[in-house]
Image (cartoon, grey):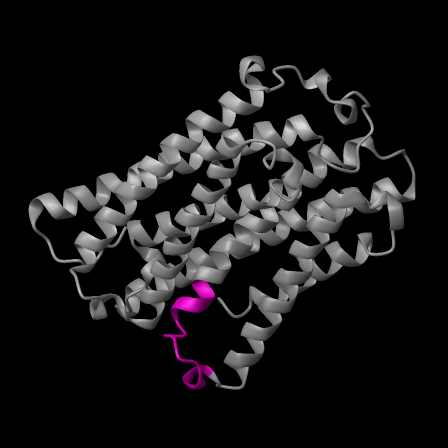
Amino acid sequence: MCYLLRLPQLFCTCVAFSLVVDMGILRGAVGNWSMFIWCFCFATTLIISIVELCKFQSRFPFFWYNIPVIYACYAALLCLLAFIIYATTHVRFLPYGPYRDRAITATAFSCIASVFYAMEVACLWQYYELKEIPCYVHTMPGLLKVLETFVACLIFSFLSHTSLYLHQPALEWCVAVYSICFIPAALAILWNLAGWEYRLPVSFLIFQFLLTLLSVLLYVSALVFWPLYQFNEKFGGHPQRSDYMDCIDGLTYYICTWDEELAVAVLTALNLLIYVADLVYWARQFSVGTPGTPDPL
């Protein structure tokens, strides 16, 4: 069943980027970013399918059974995100005609691809549970780590223009916070994939608790500084969307500056909530004195 889902995933992502690849200037920055997501998902799904068909799993240093389900989680979120952003910030501004129809079709296939990836996640979870195979993403901290790194990647995508933060040291600190918190979360996923979590010089439970506590404190500072220096006039911010010339026009093949600032603020708050949930989980594990092995969902 799980293998059969790869064919519609490949078909949907291939159709999505094929429809917009030759739109030229009408594709815009948002279109380029969405096309990258569809190309990435298509290529990665194809590689995973080839590895499994050719029985090359044993040649990888990590436990292979964790890789497809973690990738499927990210792919489902990415395709859903491309569907939402491409539809709301790009398609609705295109003039009526064949290009608009193709863009709408591409967003539809992106949404369908997201559904198929989500079905693969559910299918793999059920299979691993029946076979009693440990799966990192099938645990609360594993799922939270996926969400933390995914939201961080979204924040980085909105920070592609350095003009958003280079003019204020406090905003540069916020960007440093996003990077500092992203790297340990990504490493935690890799450690669990490779089964190295018990090779640390300290207890993995204590390590995760302290690391998550630090991330929460750092994100609290970012949640204070980013809106303060972006939207408060006393600190050089711009509270009104109309303060930016690139936000006045209704036309957009990009996301305007004020919208990018707002998106980063919202995503910062969202990731802080995820880190708080992660901290509560590890604090509960630490208080009851359980070992570092995560409980399944």
Q: Position of residue 139 (x, y in %)?
A: 29, 54
Left/right of residue 157 with respect to residue 55 in the rendered view: right
Question: Viewer-proximal residue, 227 or 58?
Answer: 227
Q: Is residue 145 visible?
A: yes
Is residue 58 inside the magenta stretch? yes
Q: Nearer the viewer, residue 255 or 261?
A: 261
Is 204 on the left-hand or right-hand side of 5?
Answer: left
Residue 250's place in the image compared with 79, above or below, is: above
Q: Total marks drawn?
A: 0
Tell me if 122 is positioned left or right of 254 in this view: left
Question: Which range is magenta?
Answer: 57-69
Q: Considering only vertical position in the picture, is 140 above or below 230? A: below
Residue that extends furthest to the right in the rendered view of this protein: 97
Residue ID at (49%, 31%):
170
- Give x and y (percent) for residue 84: 64, 38
Percent position of residue 200, x then y: 22, 66
Closer-to-camera residue (119/141): 141
Percent x, y of residue 53: 54, 82
**Magenta span contains residue 176:** no
Nearer to the camera, 243 or 187? 243
